[in-house]
Amino acid sequence: MIDELLSQQDAEAILAPHMSALRRFLEQGWSDWHESVLAAPKLATTRATSRANVVYDRITLHAEAYFEAVGIPCVRKGQMLVVSFDDGRLILRFKKFRSRKLGTSGIPTEQRLEFELQQVVLDGTAATYVVAGYLPDELGIGLDVLAIACTYNGRVIWRIDLSDDSTTSVVRVRVDSPQGPSVRSTRPAALEEVEG
């Protein structure tokens, strides 16, 4: 099946009219999460999985509205939103990346395994499955990675960087700094230690 996958150039040509929208969905889902935390600060202590679920729900809400408005087929299969481009030759879903290697996590269902092994053929046409995803920074404040990745058997075949400035402008997420007392060291200054 790997020989039948779309090239990065073919995928870019198919997705070109929607690249800035794909980036916007990912950023807006992340921004919506931060707005939720500002409205209900206790959410800041939720597990990363809970955060990913909320961000996913918000991303797919924005994506589904957009793709329905422009006439691109999208369907929910279970909890997953699947978007079909170019008569089913390119199938896109949204996920949080596990690391900079652009792998994703999830229960190894039959659907997930078919997706990761690029095994689905419809009416004699092989579909190329891709993930539009994000990776939060270490503090969970910003986003380190925004990309579309095509993987095969756990290995990235190609990627399209959505955080490239030529794709669209960056949308900053406003995060209020925590308020509290200033912290001062009780240790002598480094210069005094050197002189002694």
Image (cartoon, rainbow, N blue to C red):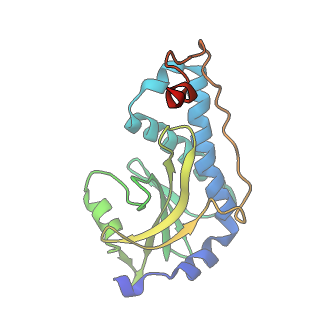
Q: Quick check: 185 left or right of 16?
A: left
At which x and y percent is residue 7? 51, 82
**What residue is shown at x 56% (from left), y 47% (from top)?**
143
| Quarter of the N terminus within the rendering | bottom left
| 155 or 131: nearer the viewer | 155
Q: Quick check: 136 left or right of 107?
A: right
Residue placed farthest to the front in the image?
196
- Residue 187 vs 61, above or below: the answer is above
Residue placed farthest to the bottom in the image?
3
At which x and y percent is residue 43? 48, 24
Q: Can residue 79 be seen in this view?
A: yes
At which x and y percent is residue 110? 25, 61
Q: Is residue 67 visible?
A: no
User: Number of numbered discs present?
Assistant: 0
- Residue 32 vs 87, above or below: the answer is above
**What residue is shown at x 64% (from left), y 31% (from top)?**
175
Q: Quick check: 170 left or right of 189?
A: right
Displayed quadrant of residue 179: top right
Q: Quick check: 75 left or right of 151?
A: right
At which x and y percent is residue 188? 52, 20
- Residue 58 vs 144, above or below: the answer is above
Residue placed farthest to the top in the image?
181
| 81 or 4: nearer the viewer | 4
Displayed quadrant of residue 5: bottom left
**What residue is shown at x 70% (from left), y 46% (from top)?**
171
